[in-house]
Image: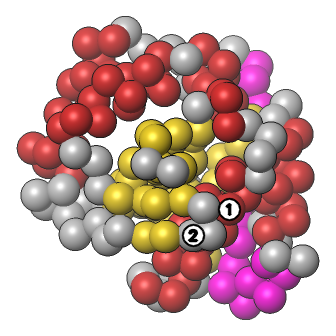
Amino acid sequence: MTPTLRSERLLLSPYTPDDEDDFVALLRDEEVCKWMGQERQPEETIRQLFALLFSEVYPNAMFDVWAVRLDGRYIGHAELKKTGNVDGHELICALVRDVWRMGLGTELSYRVIDYGFDELGLAEIHGCVDANNTRSLAMARKAGFEIVRDVTGSDGTVTRVVTLRAAARHLLRK
């Protein structure tokens, strides 16, 4: 079961049904989707995805997925899961726009990374970052992630696959 995690300012907890509208609003935001490297989906598709958390993901312990809160307010989403994008576990984070540039993305990422290495015993954690997302790439480099390859989509967009190995973790928080 997805555990509740805390960082200095953030609370990461499993979603509840009451989070649905916030989840939908986050994933319907064009700027958020742009930096996540995904196309904006119809509202109904996102609501169906949210319902899967309660019918499939949480009951079957498929992967860890959290609602992210700051001072009790929903501000984002985080996942740590095996995906087809990488050979291993991928870190996925998204925050609402009004909290961007407050250092919360870094704080959120570090907390999930700590969980992956300390609690799950992962040897490495991967991320997929739009090549134009300079802020996320800078945060990834600061955390010790290395760019391992670029993937060019059919539309010409480039996604950088980054990897943080447990052995390189000493670089965190410098």
In this view, the residue in front, 84 or 58, is: 58
Q: Earlier in the sequence, mark 1 or mark 2?
A: 2
In this view, the residue in front, 72 or 14, is: 72
Relative to 107, is 52 above or below?
Answer: above
Q: Say whether marks 1 and 2 touch (CB < 8 Å).
A: yes
Relative to 45, is 150 above or below?
Answer: below
* Residue at the (88%, 39%) spot, across then down: 134
In this view, the residue in front, 161 or 76, is: 76
* Left or right of residue 132, residue 156 in this image: left
Relative to 64, is 40 above or below?
Answer: above
SS state under label 2: loop
Type of amino acid under label 2: Ser
Mark identifier at residue 107: 1
Circle 1 crowding by C-alpha within 10 Å: few under 14, some 14–19, many from 20: some
The residue range painted magenta reads 156-172
* Residue at the (39%, 54%) spot, across then down: 66
Which of the 4 image quadrants contains residue 9?
bottom right
Task: Please provide percent x and percent y for residue 142.
Answer: 87, 65
**Distance between the alpha carbons at the discs numbered 1 and 2:** 7 Å
Which of the 4 image quadrants contains residue 131?
top right
Circle 2 crowding by C-alpha within 10 Å: few under 14, some 14–19, many from 20: few
Asked whether 170 falls inside the magenta stretch, the response is yes
Asked whether 110 falls inside the magenta stretch, the response is no
Mark identifier at residue 7: 2
Which of the 4 image quadrants contains residue 55?
top left
Mark identifier at residue 132: none
* Left or right of residue 67, residue 89 in this image: right
Q: Is residue 65 in sight in this rendering? A: yes
Task: Please provide percent x and percent y for residue 96.
Answer: 58, 31
Q: Is residue 84 in sight in this rendering? A: no
* Residue at the (32%, 23%) spot, across then down: 21
Relative to 124, is 59 above or below?
Answer: above
